[in-house]
Image (spheres, rainbow, N blue to C red):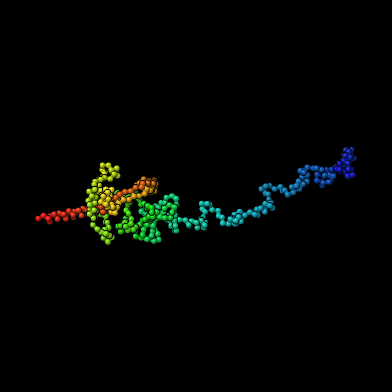
Amino acid sequence: MADIFYAGMPDWLDALNQLANGQLEPIQVDWNAMPGSIKAILNKPILAAVATSGSKGDIGLGNVDNTSDANKPVSILQQAALDRKAAKGSKADAGLSNVDNTSDANKPVSILQQAALNLKVNAASPSTTGTWSHSGGSLSLNSGAANWGSLGSASASSSYLAFIRGGTSAPAGYIGTDGGGVISGGSGTNLVLRATNYLQLGADSGAVLPITDATATFGSSGYRWTNSYFTVSPTITSDAREKDRFRVLTPTEIAAAADLARAIGVYRWKTAIMLKGDGAREHIGPTVQAAIQIMESYGLDPFKYGFICYDSWQGGTIEHAAIEATDDREMQAAWTETIPAGDRYAFRYDELNQFIAAGFEARQAAIEARLAALESAVP
């Protein structure tokens, strides 16, 4: 072994023998002796070294202080990290200088939000400009009690409410004013005004007029009015300035008129019998088919005369919208009305009666002329 306990004595075994024989003084052990000293304890425990020297460096803890956790100082790296943080209460250091500690319920309206709101219409007393459209469900416009609902335009002479056919821009009909009255019209399809009880039309001047003169028909052969009431008889135009080829009946026409008078009979409507049974009322007049046969029997074309009418129509459907329930009526669901194709004959009774009357007068005049001739021949 190369370990040396005593100078000049390389063999540790000899040294131990001499020490045992009392030939050598015992070596004083020094816990704090420098390494390599004969007094140093080789391979001494670390804790033992600390215990003997009191130096924390002996165990590699030179930077450790006996300080409680609560009193630990801020390290250099910790301070460097803290230096990169914003001080408490400083919004600007965090890049949030515009942030306020305001609850959601008390947040103000931003400039952009207000600009967006300015483009919206008020729910109460709304006012809009430009073109306004609605699609989807039903549209309801309700005015308060004792208030009028109104639709207006910049020009009183061209204020219209138009009904547009689905999927197109063409109006199916319109209601509006020409500046002095209410007018309505359509473009090939029906515009329906309907009331549960009475549909009333009125004008300050006392006249309800068609949109143009002598072009509109009141009702049709397929959609007839059941009755009409007047305080005086209807006024029919009969201005000589608007008539041409005014003539008297021919002898053939006079004979046909007599047969038409003989064709007058008493009848009851089948629809009335279905509704009223024996209570159906009786009416007076000929049938159009009988009149046609009579005219043709005299070689006359019945359809050249205005008192004989014939109309036919194609079948189709009409979509009826739903009607909401009110205090005085029940709700009516939307429904489709099917109109079968058909035709119908009709009279213009005023002209038919005039034709028969003219025939009577001609026959009466002929009888009186013959009587006069006979009387003058009697001595």
Residue at x 39%, y 57% (from the top left corner): 160
Residue at x 32%, y 54% (from the top left corner): 217
Q: Which quadrant, please, contains the C terminus? A: bottom left
Q: Can residue 198 be seen in this snapshot? A: no
Q: Is residue 168 above or below residue 27?
A: below
Q: Is residue 200 above or below residue 41?
A: below
Q: Is residue 320 left or right of residue 112?
A: left
Q: Is residue 155 left or right of residue 367?
A: right
Residue 161 figure quarter: bottom left
Residue 303 in the image: x percent, y percent? 29, 52
Residue 365 in the image: x percent, y percent? 18, 55
Q: Can residue 279 be seen in this snapshot? A: yes
Most distant residue in the left direction = 379
Q: Nearer the viewer, residue 320 or 113?
A: 320
Residue 72 in the image: x percent, y percent? 68, 49
Q: Is residue 154 left or right of residue 344?
A: right
Q: Is residue 215 left or right of residue 55?
A: left
Residue 364 in the image: x percent, y percent? 18, 53
Q: Nearer the viewer, residue 272 or 27?
A: 272
Q: Nearer the viewer, residue 223 or 79?
A: 223
Q: Which quadrant, please, contains the N terminus? A: top right
